[in-house]
Image (cartoon, rainbow, N blue to C red):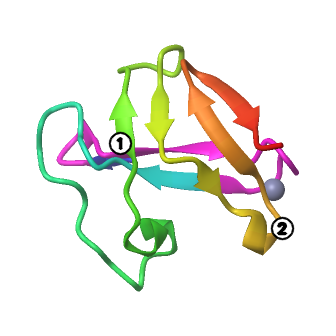
């Protein structure tokens, strides 16, 4: 996901159902800009939640804390070094 052509987040296919895209907005954008502002009208806004990011590509992406879409019946787990690790 981009703002002013700079990445401010990412979306990935839910590893659980492979049908919905899970949006993740970064707390720390790669270009050093502020995290995307809260926008309750935007379903991709993560309800104001933001994730700490390290890595600049899908292969080295690490997100913290874990992603928990389980209340909506979707995936819960962590992204570490580009790998989706499903929570036990
Ligand atoms: Zn799912």
Q: Quadrant of the C terminus?
A: top right
Residue beneath the point at 41% across and 85% down: 41
Residue beneath the point at 12% across and 37% down: 32
Farthest residue to the left: give it: 33
Residue beneath the point at 24% across and 42% down: 28
Q: Secondary structure at mark 2?
A: loop
Q: Magenta stretch containing residue 15, yes or no?
A: yes
Crowding at label 2, few (<14), some or many (≥20) Cα neighbours within 10 Å? few
Q: Is mark 2 within 8 Å of ligand 1?
A: yes
Q: Quadrant of residue 29?
A: top left
Q: Magenta stretch containing residue 65, yes or no?
A: no
Ligand 1: give its quadrant. bottom right
Range covered by the magenta-colored residues: 3-21
Q: Secondary structure at mark 1?
A: strand
Q: Is residue 5 left or right of residue 47?
A: left
Give yes or no for contact between labels 1 and 2 (Cβ–Cβ under 8 Å): no
Q: Is residue 34 left or right of residue 40?
A: left
Residue 70 place in picture, x, y as percent: 76, 64
Q: Which one is in front, 4 or 71?
A: 71
Query: Eyeballing the image, is 71 above or below 63?
Result: below
Crowding at label 1, few (<14), some or many (≥20) Cα neighbours within 10 Å? some
Residue 60 place in picture, x, y as percent: 48, 15
Q: Earlier in the sequence, mark 1 or mark 2?
A: 1
Residue 35 place in picture, x, y as percent: 22, 54
**Where is mark 1, residue-wise?**
52
Mark 1 vs mark 2: give the one in front: 1
The tag on residue 35 is none
Q: Quadrant of residue 31?
A: top left
**Where is mark 2, residue-wise?**
73
């Amino acid at each position: 996901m981009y703002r002013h052509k700079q990445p401010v987040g990412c979306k990935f296919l839910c590893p659980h159902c492979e049908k919905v895209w899970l949006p993740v907005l970064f707390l720390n954008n790669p270009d050093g800009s502020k995290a995307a502002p809260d926008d309750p009208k935007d379903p991709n806004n993560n309800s104001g939640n933001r994730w700490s990011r390290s890595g600049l590509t899908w292969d080295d992406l690490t997100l913290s804390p874990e992603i928990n879409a389980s209340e909506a019946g979707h995936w819960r787990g962590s992204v570490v070094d580009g790998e989706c690790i499903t929570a036990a």
